[in-house]
Image: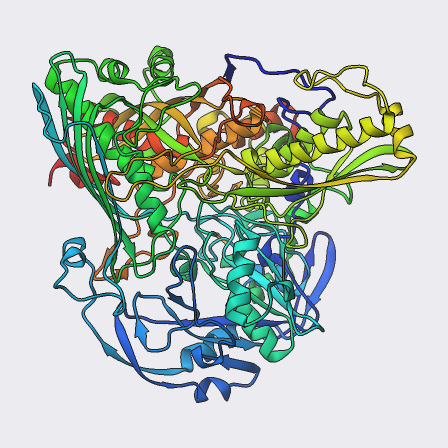
Amino acid sequence: MRVTCTVNGVDRTADDVWEGESLLYVLRERLGLPGSKNACEQGECGSCTVYLDGTAVCACLVAAGQAAGRDVRTVEGLAPEGGLDPVQRAFLQAGAVQCGFCTPGLIVSVHDLLAHNPQPTDPEIREALAGNLCRCTGYEKIMDAVRLAAADGAGAA
Amino acid sequence: MTTVHVGLPAAVDGGVGASPQRPDGRLKVTGEFAFSSDLWADDMLWGATLRSPHPRARITALDIGPALRVPGVYAVLTHEDVPGAPLYGLEHVDQPVLAAREIRYQGEPIVIVAADHPETARRAARLVEVAYDVLDPVTELAAALDPAGPQVHADRPNLLRHVPIRRGDPHATAAVVVTGEYEVGMQDQAFLGPESGLAVPAEDGGIDLYIATQWLHVDQRQVAACLGLPPEKVRLTLSGVGGAFGAREDLSMQVHACMLALHTGRPVKMVYGREESFFGHVHRHPARLRYEHGADADGRLVYVKARILLDGGAYASSTGAVVANAATLGVGPYDVPNVVMDAYGLYTNNPPCGAMRGFGAVQACFAYESQMDKLAAALGLDPVEVRVRNALTTGDLMPTGQVVEGPAPVAELLRLVRERPPAPAVGDFLPGGTANTTRGEGVVRGVGFGIGIKNVCFSEGFDDFATARVRLELVGGRPAVLVHTAAAEVGQGLVTVQAQIVRTELGVEQVTIAPADTAVGSAGSSSASRQTYMTGGAVRAACQAIRTRLLERLGRAPSTTDNDKKVPFLALEEIAELLGEGAIEETVEWRHRPTHPLDPATGQGDAHVQYAFAAHRATVDVDLELGLVKVVEIVTAQDVGKAVNPGAVAGQIQGGTAQGLGLALMEEIQVVDGKVRNPSFTDYLLPTIMDMPPMSLDVLELADPHSPYGLRGVGEPPTISSTPAVVAAIRAATGAALTRVPVRPEHIVGV
Ligand code: FES
Ligand code: FES
């Protein structure tokens, strides 16, 4: 089948999509956007988190067909070309990136958190990110990154 | 983080001791960093694997016809298609590339398929018809130990390795004796980036493999042998590695992807799904440990007797070295005059086990630290006090007779974690978290301690080296450095550290790290907490060779000659002028001081390069009715010798601590009759950000006299002692015996 949707503000079409394919697969393998990650493809890790019509979802759980005609925003589309979103900058500055496999999904989740709650408390951060696994950091520096992004007014933008 | 001892100043910004941002960080936050699962080539095919559903069986018939007939399928290969050696392995060559007849574990690969869509490849693989003669698996350690029992490998005994250690009087007696039996479940490394890579056939009949691994050259050696190609025709390039933790030491899809690519003449990509990943790599050895500690009335250890059984699963992997670690480190960071230790690694039909962060030291530490708490209770002593009274220190002997050289601040680390202010009276979450299973009724608190010891680098006489090629040249009229090694960046920050070392040694700020590949000599593995030590040491040595060359060109003594003060030894302008004669390139193969084998009967010998220590204090809240645990806080102290990158050091300690917490509370591959019951992130639980408490760190920098900058390997120690600390805290809260990890709610409530 053919799937057409808006990805990072651009109309994109994927052809020959098999109906079992996920939005994640289409983004990664058909549209050249491998930034969203494939750590579990079972909805358990959050590494594939993207915005679908403004709501953060696990792209591995969305059938490609369900994305037709809708608006998708991935980690690649958070900042204008060549720039960094404040959340991305905060992850870099806080040293919250090790292997980086969890990072794109976490950044979208944090971006979403701060959009709804620009000054979250620590327990609120933990609750909001409970669906994003990271195996490298023990989450301390991820907490630091979120606090830093919040202090920089990331959510207010 | 508190830094207690300050190291040398850096010559330029971003040198040794600073925490510059990762050079790959920007690509990682924007999603542009190419992990091994992100690769793509024109015309590429996808590989898939058919694996055995049985842990022990004999293949009686195999028909690939139905798979070959699927449209879109380009190749279906079996053991008959392996061009070279049929077996591979890290220490023992015992594992089939594809099973021929004998199946020795559930998930053993039998057939590989290449197709134009990953789902087509997977479906075709499922259509292969395999007839099995299903056999009773050997899954219990006792059965595996029985010489009269069934053998996992017909041509060798189940006993893979026995390491005995005898020190002092084997018949020593003591006033106070405590015994215990402990069990450690099978932990998974659970890196997030699944096994994956891209194999591209080359015009010379060879292959280019883009792969996530921990050691390019050990992969190259094994892949070349199995493909029947000379190593120079098997060229490996490291692609983005989504975590490793030991699980990428052994081969997974490397040979398979290359076989499919060579067979079809097209690039082949393989990416395991999460379920397949659980079958695609080795795990941490499950263990059964029996300990007896004898002490005098003051709590000083008189003897330790121990027997450690490690389940190696179906293939050897690195079991031999894991057994040696468990044995040599098995009494912990304590001075024990009399030791009778026996550690055994066994073949079974369980999933193969091998390297995971902590490597044999983890299992032993849970047992000996549990014993130290028991001893404290028997003596009516404080648990930290009994540890301090026995703490290993510089000049003491290990059970192997090896003298502990350099700082061994065991007592100091214990005091640091004890003296930290107590955890807040109320944590952010109660046990049960947002499920609101309690409002605080029935919740009790406990505090526990743990300390561990780990060897750094490869041991027992292994020829352990790392290669670095460093090139100093003018780029746009300014001195710049290119570093080329084969060392695997797996997330730990080695790329950052290499550049820091160059800046400190040469005073040149602009440093580029070339992609790691096999075009340069081996760097050894990114494991055993060794890579900053080894590849860092090689980069430093190459820089020093370049300094010598520069000074030769200069023809006179430099303005500053003190090699130990990292002030620029030449001004940038001077370097630029000297480089007018051309670039300078130096390649250095660098070794740590030699180690020696263990005596096979007594376990005596200077087997290890360096020892590293970390201590933890854990504070937990426990819901006594439901058996739920919330870790409220963890404090850690670790001696790192020199924090080459303090930010990365903290990241290693925090991440390692989390993996130890996972083993204490939730992480276990459940194996029943040789079959894995929970190969998914739904059922194999990893610590989430809700499970992790705030952590605070004390980092000591007590220089090791033998290592570059005095550094000590950092990655593994924090994983080792957090497990016993968490369990001790639960015991303190509940009084439950807790002899097994991970602790389950039923162990706490006693149902
Ligand atoms: S890949 Fe989608 S949740 Fe893990
Ligand atoms: S940085 Fe590796 S999984 Fe989070």
Horizontal and vertical percent for residue B375?
15, 22
In the drawing, does residue B492 fall left or right of residue B294? right
- Residue drawn at 65 percent across, 75 percent down: B266
Residue B733 found in image quarter: top left
In the drawing, does residue B320 fall left or right of residue A38? left
Query: Which residue occupies the foreground of this view, A150 or B373?
Result: B373
Horizontal and vertical percent for residue A127?
44, 35
Please determine whether, in this image, residue B122 is positioned above or below residue B309.
below
Query: Which residue occupies the foreground of this view, B637 or B541?
Result: B541
* Residue B684 seen in render: no
Query: Which residue occupies the foreground of this view, B375 or B402?
Result: B402
Residue B59 found in image quarter: bottom left
Residue B366 found in image quarter: top left
* Residue B459 seen in render: yes
- Residue drawn at 27 percent across, 59 percent down: B350
Mark count: 0
Please determine whether, in this image, residue A46 is positioned above or below residue B452.
below
Please determine whether, in this image, residue B393 is positioned above or below residue B217.
above
Query: Which residue occupies the foreground of this view, B252 or B484?
Result: B484
Horizontal and vertical percent for residue A4?
67, 66
Please determine whether, in this image, residue B110 is positioned above or below residue B461.
below
- Residue drawn at 48 percent across, 52 percent down: B248
**Quadrant occupied by the C terminus of chain B:** top left
Visual colour scheme: rainbow
Horizontal and vertical percent for residue A73?
65, 50
